[in-house]
Each structure stands twice: as structure tokens, then as C-alpha cells.
Amino acid sequence: MPDAHRPLWTAPEIALAVGGRIEGGSFEASGVAYNSREITPGDLFVALKGARDGHEFAAGAFTSGAVGALVERPVDGGPCIVVPDTLKALEALGAAARDRAPQIRRGAVTGSVGKTSVTQAIKAGLDLAGPAHSSIKSYNNHIGVPLTLARMPASVERAVFEIGMNAPGEIAPLSKMVLPHAACVTTVGPVHIEGFSDGETGVAREKAAIFEGLAAGGVAVVNGDNPWRDVLRSAALKAGGRIATFGSEIGHDARLIDFAPGPDGARVTAEIRGRTHVFPLKQSGFHWGLNSLAVILMLEALDVPVETALAALADFQPLAGRGQTRRVAVPGGAFTLIDESYNANPLSMRAGFMSLGARTAPPGGRRVVVLTDMLELGDQAQALHAGLAEWIEAAGIEVVHAAGPQMRWLYDAVAPERRGQWRDTAAALAEIADDLVGPNDIVMVKGSNGSKASLVAAALADLERRHGLNDAMGSV
């Protein structure tokens, strides 16, 4: 939140930062937004040009409470600051927010899996330690990163930023914008590989580019269990970073000793800087064993004690579509729904199967997966989808429902006795939600956001209402 005693930005401060001219009078802004539908009273509206020209929505932004607009041409409805290029102006405003508050310790997170959840878990620890700031949602691209910086109050003590990519060359400029004191790569895997001519090698190099923006003396937090750890370490050393590693082998700064999932989360045993800690998580996915260590090392690098980090992890709830778990009443009993519908790739699929396989269904119940296509896998899509069959078998998952043309490759690869339903789209699978589950089942829904796994998760969660069983079982 902005400092109660001063605005986030005044019009003269903005104009100085972005090299613009004020028209229509001065103003004070308490926030910054570029989506006119997300304006809250007191915001500065940034008119970006994308599929639509943001200038067309300036009047609506003022009606919703915007106090000023950052524009390339004057608009009606309120005062504005005119600049040649609003995206470059937003970047300049973000840099000014960073430079005016050099006392703020900044962290940055990327990775093929888990970057949003890890970023928000770090934020939970920062909040316990003092006033803090972070990305919201998955604001991790060329707009989201400078926007998050521009929204950063000068009064906070620490901040953490998520940095993502879809193609080569995107991460380094964003990291150099943030200039983090600590940066982390959660893991590297075959995600967004269709944008890289050299496949996963290119993904690893791109993720490692987050270390190019490290502030002097900054800490590079590296996953020592990842096959691409040498690429990450080399990039960190080249950038002058101090390396802190997490993993399952002896010698890491944070070592995972044991991860024990249960119905309400998991218990982690880890050695941090030579001291053994046992702590609970509300996450049950096996990938959270290493994720929790990444969080701890990042918080340490941002001057947050390990005890504070453990307290934050113990209370950190799974994010929407990223492991939220609830009981859903159906005729004859109830089933457990694990909603992993926000996104998917081969790494997170394997972790999800392992976690589900570690759970024991109540008598008469089954371990069930409902899967939709993993996207952006290029010419490896068929092999990577079909290859999930061995992980499903190893986890002992009894039933596989699937939707989408790419998941058909997996559906055909699993043993016939494991095959449930297949439909060509998630919407079609959602229509037969009643046929996918039964009492005492444990059901995980997972797929890429673009393949609409969330439709199936929503349909399964809605079975309780559809059957008139309104005594909600609640979250677990």
C-alpha cells in the first residue's frame, strides 16, 4: 500500500521521471494501472497500445476514478502527461520508483515451474518481516514488470518480482530493470520450447539470464538438483553473483532430507546452513519440497530470518488453480478435488503424479487424474505427452480422463485398464463431470491454461450444487 502520508506519485514527479509534459492540471496518484477495467479511484491510467489502443479507454478510466493519464496524445476526461511512447514511459517510471528508494531489498524469481507460487510465498515472508511489495497475478512480462516497479511505494523495505518469458531475449532486460539483490531460478524444463531453436538448452540459457541483472554483491539461488545447474551457476558467476544452492544432495546450502505429503499438506525435513528444521506446509505437491528451500534462501538473501521464513511457509495457502484442495459432496459420499488447472508442463505433471500417488484413497475410492493438453511443446509434443504414461503407472494412478488432441497421445499410451473418458475438448469433458468421479476418489485436474482445464475443475467443484448437496465439505 502507498504511504498514508504521501501519494505514490505526483504529476510533477511522473513528468520528470518520464520526460513528459503535464496538460490539464496537476494531480496526485495512489496507484498505476493500464487496464481500464481494473481502475480504482486515485490511479494513474497508462494508455498502452496493443491489440487495442489504450487511448480509446481513457474516458472510461477517468469515469472509474483515474486522476490522471499517461498518454501519447491529449485525451478528454481529466489531466494527462504526454510522452512520445507510453510503454517506454512506463519503463522509465518503474526505473524511477526503483532509484528513488535504494534502501529497498529486491528479489526476482523465474523458472519453468513454480515461479508464481514461489514469488507469492516469498512475499508472505517479506510481509512478516516488514512493509513489502510484490507482483500481483502473473504480472511477469514486458508490461507487468515495469508496472509492478511503478506501483512500488518508496516506503517499503523489501519487494519481490516475478519474471517470465515466452521467447529468447526477454528475461535479461526485465532483470536489469529490477536490479535484484537476490534472484532465483526455481527449475528448468521443457516449457515454451517451441520458441527456441535449440529446445531446452535455449530455455536454460534464457532462465539463467535473470542473473544478468543482479545488483553488486547479489545472491543467485540455484536448484542444485536440476540437470541445467551448471548453466545456471556459470551465468551467476559471470554476473558476479554469490551462489546459494538448494537440492537433495549433501553440500547444498539448503538440503531436502524428507518430504512427507498428507491429506492437509506436507511435512518437510531440511538442513539449512547445517541446522536441521522440520516444518509443515499447506502444499502437498512434491515439488514444494524444493520450492520451500528456494523460498527460504531467497528470504535469507533479503535479510529475513529462517524462523520468519518457516512461519510464512506454514501459513501459505495454495494459489487458485495451483494445488487448491477441497472436498466435494456427491451422492453416496464425497471426493477430494485437487485443482492444478492453472498450468501444466512435463515437469509439473510428473510432480503432480508423484504427489497423488503418495496419497491413499479411502476404501472404495480411486486416484484419478483429469488432464488437458500441455501447450507450446513444439515438435516434442507427442513424445512428451505419451511419455507421461510411465509416470502415471509408476505413481499407481488408477484412472486417467483426458481431453484434447495432444492428450489423446497419452490416453492411447496408458494401459487400457487405466483409461477413463476422453473428449476432444475440455468443455466436452466438463459436460460429463458426473461420469468422471465417485465417492472417496482423490481427483487431480491439470492442464495448460490455454487448453481450459479450469472448465473441468469448475464442473467437478459444481457437482455438489448440481446435486443439491449444499452442505459444503470445505477446503482441506
Image (cartoon, helix red, strand yellow):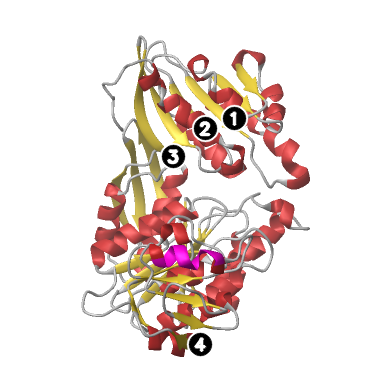
Tell me whether the residue at label 4 lies in contact with that at label 3, contact meaning CB atoms closer than 8 angstroms: no
- Crowd band around label 2 with a 10 angstrom C-alpha radius: few (<14), some (14–19), many (20+): many
**Amino acid at pointer 1:** Ala
**Amino acid at pointer 2:** Leu
Residue 57 among magenta residues: yes
Q: Quote the CA–CA distance across marks 3 and 1.
A: 23 Å
Residue 179: x %, y % from top left: 48, 77
Residue 126 located left or right of residue 391:
left
In the rendered view, would you say 178 is above or below 223?
Answer: below
Tell me whether the residue at label 2 lies in contact with that at label 1, contact meaning CB atoms closer than 8 angstroms: yes
Q: Quote the CA–CA distance across marks 4 and 3.
A: 49 Å
Please name the residue shown 39% across and 42% down the image: 258
Please name the residue shown 33% across and 16% down the image: 468
Q: Which mark is residue 455?
A: 2
Tell me whether the residue at label 3 lies in contact with that at label 2, contact meaning CB atoms closer than 8 angstroms: no
In the rendered view, would you say 323 is above or below 18?
Answer: above
| Number of numbered discs overlaid on the protein picture | 4
In terms of depth relative to the viewer, which is nearer, 133 or 256? 133
In the rendered view, would you say 333 is above or below 235?
Answer: above
Describe the element under mark 1 as helix, strand or loop: helix
**Amino acid at pointer 3:** Gly
Q: Which residue is mark 3?
A: 285
Mark 3 or mark 2: which is in front?
2
Describe the element under mark 3 as helix, strand or loop: loop
Describe the element under mark 4 as helix, strand or loop: loop
Q: Which residue is mark 1?
A: 426
- Say which label, 2 or 1, has the lower sequence index: 1
| Residue 169: quadrant of the picture | bottom right
- Say which label, 3 or 1, has the lower sequence index: 3
Furthest-front residue in this view: 76
- Crowd band around label 3 with a 10 angstrom C-alpha radius: few (<14), some (14–19), many (20+): many
Q: Which residue is mark 4?
A: 20
